[in-house]
Amino acid sequence: MNDTADKAPEGAREPTRVDPRLLEILVCPLTKSTLEYDSGRQELISRSARLAFPIRDGIPIMLPEEARRIE
């Protein structure tokens, strides 16, 4: 019996959901402004700091050195 038939292809898994209550209280660590949740990219966007903070396994990584610069 082949167990791989039940598994989704690598990279095709659904994004981990983030607790909406957590999203309500989180702010940008640099500017203290509100964040936008991008579920497709699994990021929290700070427009004022021009940074995108990654979300890994449902946990927002709010370290500026881990953030991606956005234009």
Image (spheres, helix red, strand yellow):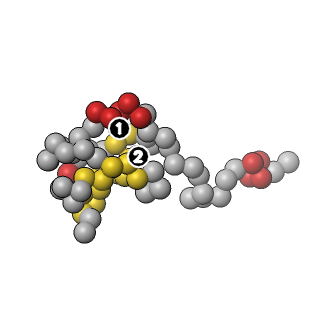
In this picture, is 62 found above or below 19?
below
Kindly indicate the quadrant of the structure image that contains residue 33. top left
Q: In the rendered structure, are the residues bearing label 2 and label 1 in contact, judged by CB atoms less than 8 Å apart?
A: no
What is the three-letter code of the residue carrying label 1? Answer: Leu
Q: As drawn, which residue projects farthest toward the top?
A: 21
**In this rendering, the label closer to the viewer, 2 or 1:** 1
Of helix, strand and loop, which one carries label 2? strand
Q: Quadrant of the C terminus?
A: bottom left
Kindly indicate the quadrant of the structure image that contains residue 67. bottom left
Residue nearest the viewer, comparing 68 with 70? 70
Q: Residue at point 43% right, 34% down?
A: 19
Q: Which residue is denoted by mark 1 in the rendering? A: 23
What is the three-letter code of the residue carrying label 2? Answer: Arg
1 horizontally vs 8: left or right: right
In this picture, is 19 found above or below 32?
above
Residue 69 shows up from this direction: yes
Q: Earlier in the sequence, mark 2 or mark 1?
A: 1
Q: Residue at point 52% right, 48% down?
A: 15
> Residue 29, image x and y in percent?
18, 43
Real-space Cα separation, disc 2 to disc 1, in angstroms: 14 Å
Q: As drawn, which residue projects farthest toward the left?
A: 31
**Mark 1 Cα within 10 Å, few/some/many (few <14, many 20+)?**
some
Residue 65 shows up from this direction: no
Residue nearest the viewer, comparing 36 with 70? 36
Of helix, strand and loop, which one carries label 1? helix
In this picture, is 45 found above or below 24?
below
Q: Residue at point 43% right, 57% down?
A: 41
> Residue 55, image x and y in percent?
38, 47
> Residue 45, image x and y in percent?
30, 53
Q: Which residue is denoted by mark 2 in the rendering? A: 56
43 horizontally vs 15: left or right: left
